[in-house]
Image (cartoon, rainbow, N blue to C red):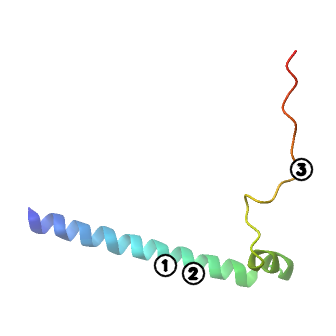
């Protein structure tokens, strides 16, 4: 049973490494095919959380 759990652990680690590798390859392919303006803003460090559309919104009025 110990061998089986060790083998399962090795398979799980290999699968995680494979998924991370595929995600990195996909991200690089998307950046390579992206328009220049999008790629430039990504390299400048613009994060998704720092961008807001339309500015801050006030809280709703309570009657």
- Find residue 45 and report its horizontal and vertical position in percent: 74, 74
- Find residue 3 and report its horizontal and vertical position in percent: 11, 69
As displayed, is residue 58 above or below residue 32? above
Q: Is label 3 in a helix, a strand or a loop?
A: loop
Q: Residue at x 31, y 67 (%)?
A: 12
Q: Residue at x 78, y 78 (%)?
A: 44
**Callouts 3 and 2 close, C-beta under 8 Å:** no
> Which mark is first along the chain, 3 or 1?
1
In front: mark 1 or mark 3? 3
Q: Residue at x 56, y 78 (%)?
A: 24
Whole-angstrom CA distance, mark 3 to mark 2, is 34 Å
Q: Return the residue at label 1.
A: 21
Q: Residues within 10 Å of mark 2 (few under 14, many from 20)?
A: few
Q: In the rendering, which numbered label is found on residue 55?
A: 3
Nearer-the-camera pick, 42 or 59 = 59
**Callouts 1 and 2 close, C-beta under 8 Å:** yes
- Find residue 61 and report its horizontal and vertical position in percent: 88, 24
In which quadrant of the rendered view does residue 25 lie? Answer: bottom right
> Which mark is first along the chain, 2 or 3?
2
Q: Return the residue at label 2.
A: 25
Q: Is residue 2 left or right of residue 63?
A: left
Quarter that holds the N terminus: bottom left
- Give the farthest residue toward the top: 63
- Give the farthest residue toward the left: 1
């Amino acid at each position: 049973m110990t061998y089986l759990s060790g083998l399962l652990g090795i398979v799980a680690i290999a699968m995680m490494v494979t998924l991370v590798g595929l995600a990195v390859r996909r991200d690089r392919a998307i950046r390579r095919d992206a328009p220049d303006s999008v790629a430039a803003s990504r390299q400048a460090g613009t994060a998704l959380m720092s961008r807001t559309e339309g500015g801050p919104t006030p809280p709703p009025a309570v009657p």
